[in-house]
Amino acid sequence: MKLNLFMNKLLKLFLFLSLIITFGFQQKIINCEIETSLGTILVELYPDKAPLTVSNFLKYADSGLYNNSSFFRVCTPQNEADRSIKIEVIQGGNIDETKSYPPIIMENTSITGIKHLNGTISMARSGPNTATSQFFICVNDQPELDYKGKRNPDGQGFAAFGKVIEGMDIVLKIQQQENKDQYLINPILIKTIKRVE
């Protein structure tokens, strides 16, 4: 009888601790403001789905390394006309390479489940596991940037980690700026990227 009572209490304690661990350690969505010379873009980041990628982005933001960087590249229907796999994005986060942190392991869409939809924020890269500071924001849905997409020949796609929740009008303004071979004639200043409540 005493053993049954003890086991019952032990089971309740185990269930209670399981609930604390499950709900107490879940990471919440993190919001960040990207303040540009054309206006502010508000993004939400998903540390529960893409912990390495979000942590990397926040490391640059929290240390001020994104301050005075820029959105410098845009992909538009016009400047992508000759490519077989076309995309629409704005790319930013170019910092002094000597201040870059080591590249991160790529959490592609097959791992995170975060697809490249209109407003998705994702890491720019060359090969797999090469992303450092540069990121891009999708204009319209871009499935060819997901895992097994054809934009990058390696088929690994890109590491999406959040989405724009306010300021897509600013994203579109940036995309419409004058460019030459996808690079903006006058890059758009990123004043700061900071966490907000």
Image (cartoon, rainbow, N blue to C red):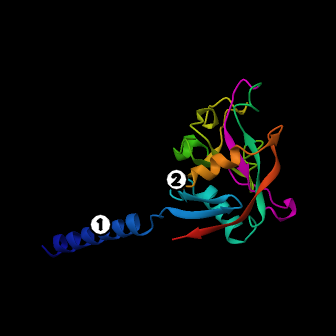
* Residue at which label 2 appears: 49
For badge 2, the amino acid type reads Lys
Q: Position of residue 56 (x, y in %)?
A: 67, 61
For badge 1, the amino acid type reads Leu
Question: What secondary structure is marked by label 1?
Answer: helix
168 vs 107, nearest the viewer = 168
How many C-alpha atoms fall within 10 Å of the one at disc 1: few (<14), some, or many (≥20)?
Answer: few
Task: Please say whether residue 3 is visible from this viewpoint.
Answer: yes
Q: Which residue is at a point 73% across and 70% down the rendered structure image?
A: 64
Magenta stretch: helix, strand or loop mostly:
loop
* Residue at which label 1 appears: 15
Question: From the viewer's perspective, is 42 left or right of 66?
Answer: left
* 3D distance between C-alphas at marks 2 and 1: 25 Å
What is the span of residues highlighted in magenta in the rendered image? Answer: 83-107
Q: Position of residue 76 (x, y in %)?
A: 70, 36
Q: Position of residue 86 (x, y in %)?
A: 69, 30
166 vs 124, nearest the viewer = 166
119 vs 7, nearest the viewer = 119
* Residue found at the very far right of the displayed protein: 98
Q: Position of residue 47 (x, y in %)?
A: 54, 59
Counting residues from the N terminus, which is met first, the one under dot 2 or under dot 1?
1
Q: Which residue is at a point 60% across and 37% down the rendered structure image?
A: 146
Q: Which residue is at a point 63% across and 52% down the rendered structure image?
A: 170
